Amino acid sequence: MRWKDVAGIKKKLSKDFFKRDTIQVAKELLGKIIEFNGVKGMIVETEAYGKDEASHASKKTERSKLMYNTFGKIYVYLVYGNYYCLNFTTEENAPGAVLIRSLEPLNGLDIMKRRRKSDDLTTGPGKLCQALNINLLVNGTDINDKLKIYDNDLKFDIVKTTRVGISKAKDLKLRFYIKGNDYISQL
DNA sequence: TACTGGATTCACT
DNA sequence: GTGAATCCAGTAA
């Protein structure tokens, strides 16, 4: 399969996909395709957040309650006053979410370049939200409502898993990566 | 009501 | 490698 074919996949990911264990969801989201207003990218880096000190879910607040009450919903928040981060809530009976850290751009590259004012489009959580024009307007909405996620039958090997310490918090987060360009050239 | 600091990015050295 | 930008959620009072 060529990467152009991947961009054309129309099989939507079911909400139940997010009902499961956060780490499992974070792993399996790799290779899935996000579309927002016609702009598309393949997920190549994710980060799993459960109920721990490094996560918003460490305390149930107005902002983080989405992580407690829901799965398969979009959780967007502002960091450092400048950038949004895109997450999907997970697990039916426990708080959790998966942060999307990096995408491989597939469609709408010109639009992304214009929004980013750069050729570095989606290689960070803040960057990809800027490229896709994701903001608080989609916070709390169901997946496949405004923002769509497409499934595929492709199997990806996780090329790297890192445990990441978050500043003051002692807890470590799990990040998962697949190779973007290398994989796309092999499809 | 006021203060603190952050799941980031970018410019500059 | 370092520091600034920027603003809102969370917390303390």
Image: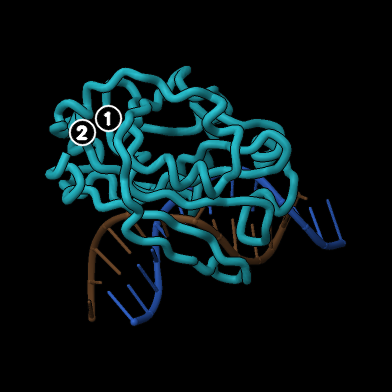
Chain colours: A cyan, B brown, C blue
Q: Earlier in the sequence, mark 1 or mark 2?
A: 1
**Are the two marked residues, 1 and 2, in contact with CB atoms closer than 8 angstroms?**
yes
Residue drawn 48% across the image and 46% down it = A26
In the image, is A165 to the left or to the right of A154?
right
Residue drawn 56% across the image and 29% down it = A73
The kind of secondary structure element at disc 1 is strand
Q: Which mark is residue A40?
A: 1
Which chain does the residue under circle 1 lie in?
A: A
Residue drawn 16% across the image and 47% down it = A119
Q: Nearer the viewer, residue A2 or A63?
A: A2
The kind of secondary structure element at disc 2 is strand
Q: What residue type is labelled 2?
A: Leu
State the image quarter where residue A170 is shown. bottom right
* Residue A69 on image: x %, y %: 71, 33
State the separation of the CA atoms marked 1 and 2: 5 Å
Give the residue number, with chain letter if any, for mark 2: A106
Q: Quadrant of the N terminus of chain A?
A: top left
In the image, is A69 to the left or to the right of A100?
right
Q: Can residue A84 be seen in this view?
A: no
